[in-house]
């Protein structure tokens, strides 16, 4: 199973200015998060950014915020949270499109058609990266899996204070059904072909 840009949404978890200095390989992790944000802009993939208790941990790091703000074509939303799982703060509702209104006289429809259903715009593949991998990323991803989203974890854009915690998170997520990928895997699966109009721009990002 390959990622499809038209079925994807990007969730970037807690890349915050007071948190990142305490994490393993923070510079590389931020650089890959920036690449993901730019890739999403090139491929018209919607983005949600979360911030955990920003009054204490600060806002999103400037490099990532600049990459997100550079795109005027791609929708980016910021979810401020106190719960470790962003799903507890409404992320699942953000990632699902509003239901289609019922057409015609609802009372005249068969019972199974009286329920509103999700629109064709639904994007069920959630590409995720963030910090800390074993806390907020893990809990959010597990809740999304429970809500029947497909979850793809971009491992080289995730971090924790220790490698052991980060790797334990990856092991648990893989066991729960998440796909573990890298930034370049996401890039080239979203492209699918060297003939894609964004190929040269994407290639420049990953070099």
Image: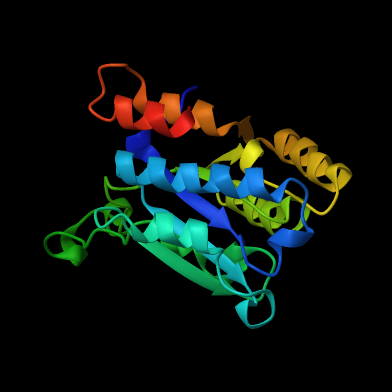
Q: Position of residue 2 (x, y in %)?
A: 47, 24
Q: Residue at x 69, y 60 (%)?
A: 20
* Residue found farthest to the left: 104
Q: In terms of image quadrants, where is residue 5?
A: top left
Q: Is residue 137 visible?
A: yes
Horizontal relation, residue 190 to residue 82: left or right: left
Residue 168, placed above or below residue 83: above
Horizontal relation, residue 55 to residue 207: left or right: right
Rendering colour mode: rainbow
* Residue found farthest to the bottom: 55
Q: Residue at x 63, y 83 (%)?
A: 55
Q: Residue at x 51, y 52 (%)?
A: 11
Horizontal relation, residue 56 to residue 163: left or right: left
Residue 127, placed above or below residue 102: above
* Closer to the camera in the image, 194 or 21: 21
Q: Position of residue 202 (x, y in %)?
A: 37, 31
Q: Is residue 149 visible?
A: no
* Closer to the camera in the image, 41 or 77: 41
* Residue found farthest to the top: 194
Residue 180, placed above or below residue 66: above
Q: Residue at x 66, y 35 (%)?
A: 177
Q: In terms of image quadrants, where is residue 114?
A: bottom left
Horizontal relation, residue 185 to residue 74: left or right: right
């Amino acid at each position: 199973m390959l990622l499809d840009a038209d079925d994807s949404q990007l969730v970037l978890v807690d890349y915050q200015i007071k948190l990142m200095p305490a994490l393993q390989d923070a510079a590389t992790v931020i650089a890959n998060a920036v690449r993901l944000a730019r890739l999403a802009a090139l491929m018209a993939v919607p983005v949600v950014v979360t911030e955990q208790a920003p009054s204490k941990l600060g806002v999103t790091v400037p490099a990532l915020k600049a990459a997100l703000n550079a795109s005027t074509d791609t929708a980016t939303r910021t979810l401020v949270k106190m719960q470790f799982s962003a799903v507890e703060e409404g992320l699942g509702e953000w990632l699902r499109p509003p239901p289609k209104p019922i057409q015609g006289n609802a009372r005249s429809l068969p019972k199974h058609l009286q329920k509103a259903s999700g629109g064709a715009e639904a994007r069920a593949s959630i590409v995720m990266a963030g910090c800390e991998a074993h806390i907020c990323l893990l809990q959010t991803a597990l809740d999304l899996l429970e809500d029947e989203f497909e979850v793809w974890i971009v491992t080289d854009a995730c971090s924790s204070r220790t490698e052991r915690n980060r790797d334990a998170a990856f092991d648990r997520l893989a066991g729960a059904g998440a796909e573990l990928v890298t930034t370049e895997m996401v890039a080239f699966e979203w492209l699918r072909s060297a003939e894609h109009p964004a190929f040269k721009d994407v290639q420049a990002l990953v070099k």
